[in-house]
Amino acid sequence: MSTQTVNNAQAHESMFEAVLARLDAAAKLMNLSSDVLNVLRNPQKEVKVSLPITMDNGSIQVFEGYRTVHSTHLGPSKGGIRYALDVNSDEVRALAAWMSFKCAVANLPYGGAKGGIKCDPRAMSVGELERLSRAYAKAMKDVFGVNRDIPAPDMGTSGREMAWMLDEYNKVVGEDSPGVITGKPIAVGGSLGRDAATGRGVMVNTLAALKKMNLNPSQVTAVVQGFGNVGSHAARLLSEKGIKIVGIGDHTASYYNEKGIDIQAALDFAAKNNRVLKGFTGATEIQASELLISKCDVLVPAALQNVITVDNATKIQAKLIVEGANGPTAPEADQILNDKNIICIPDILANSGGVTVSYFEWVQNKAGYYWTEEEVNTKHDLKMEIAFEAIWNNSAKYKSSMRLAAYITALEKIELGVKLKGAY
Ligand code: NAD
């Protein structure tokens, strides 16, 4: 096994173990001090709360809520809040650690955190969701803070939940503090450009990688898995840059058209079709399992975790993978992609556009002064290009994959924070 291989037998059992496997591999390659590694292997703070909520039928249901702060060495912790049935302490811990690395990669003055509530948001009424969101914000009032810990939306949450949580937090602390939470609707302090930011980051990273590979976007094809926030904006922005999108898919259907798919037509179709692609006629429907291994130059997994595995990695035809989703590649598949010389832009770089514009939202909230969408996009693109270049260079320096180079780049910064701030 090469030093770059992350062959972690426990990865399937624990998401946090999978994070630690990649952390350990990067630490070994860069010779990170064992003291710093030990600090980062242990999250700083983990809070679990029970939230009794009156349901619409009058019964009381108790929900589990979590918030884990992984690190605050580079600044207050930042990370989303997920509503899903499989939320648990291990997953929240893993996602919190990823946020520490992602914020460091994107050069943001933040540590990492993540939160979640174990619930099925689609099975709850709007009133039940509002009561649950408010109860969670109140229970976490001592964890959150504009200079302490700043949440944002994640799977199952959106600007709506952020507005409820902001309002509850403001009531509890007795002042208006819009910067305590990001991903808010524009009317209550959100930032222009936030909605498309993660897809935009995918586009900027794709163009930067193609340039290094001496490939002209107008001669390149791409497949995008996921047609939600990240996937739909990524597909639109990539096609606007001249890349031919030959495959798209969501949880309802997958489509392929070697002549190229009209992405605006797909967006219009989904907008009128409950935001799903099933029934789209601008391409041939294919099996979901065929999408990731279909013929293309660029593959953008932008739906969910663990979709590139030892079972399909050998069949992937793309030269470049740009991870829009969090954790789409199982650790065991990394070495297969490396052996096939497929360049993989890892999630902590590829999807960091979202947290970058969340940072801009926080800056605007603190200043009480708001930027135009063009200002946001220009600042975003520059930050992404700088982050990409640093990781590309570290990949050459350490002769490592882009993934390990991204971890190393993050660890170089966090190591300084740990050492300069010191310990008791
Ligand atoms: P979303 O809910 O808006 O969209 C998810 C998409 O994935 C939908 O089109 C859905 O149909 C599709 N999908 C679900 N299951 C699927 C399956 N089995 N096969 C194919 N497609 C499937 O979510 P999103 O915000 O776009 O997030 C997608 C991923 O990106 C997640 O991993 C998320 O953590 C990550 N991410 C999102 C952001 C952001 O700003 N939204 C930022 C960073 C990372």
Image (cartoon, rainbow, N blue to C red):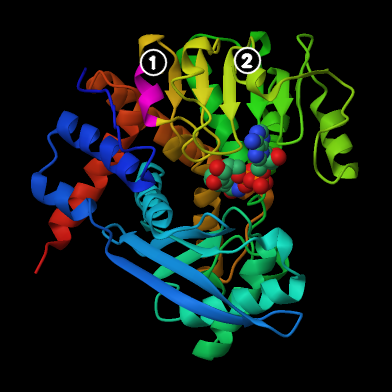
Apparent side of residue 52 relative to residue 262 in the rendered image (left or right): left
By secondary structure, the bulk of the magenta-drawn segment is best described as helix
In this rendering, is residue 239 above or below 113? above
What residue lies at 30% left-to-right and 62% top-to-bottom?
A: 72
Magenta residues span 331-335
Residue type of the residue flagged with mark 1 = Ile
Residue type of the residue flagged with mark 2 = Pro
Q: Position of residue 293 (x, y in %)?
A: 59, 15
Apparent side of residue 296 relative to residue 387 in the rendered image (left or right): right
* Quadrant of the rendered image containing residue 358: bottom right
From the image, state whether disc 1 or disc 2 is nearer to you: 1
> Is the residue marked 1 within 8 Å of ligand 1, measured from its CB?
no
Asked whether 254 or 269 is in front, the reply is: 254
Please say whether residue 288 is visible from this viewpoint.
yes
Inter-mark Cα distance, 1 to 2:
26 Å
* Quadrant showing the C terminus: bottom left
What residue lies at 66% left-to-right and 8% top-to-bottom?
A: 219
Apparent side of residue 416 relative to residue 380 in the rendered image (left or right): left
Asked whether 302 or 210 is in front, the reply is: 302
What residue lies at 69% left-to-right and 66% top-to-bottom?
A: 160
Dot 1 or dot 2, earlier in sequence: 2
**Circle 1 Cα neighbour tier, 10 Å, few/some/many (<14 / 14–19 / ≥20):** some
Q: List the residue tagged with mark 1.
A: 336
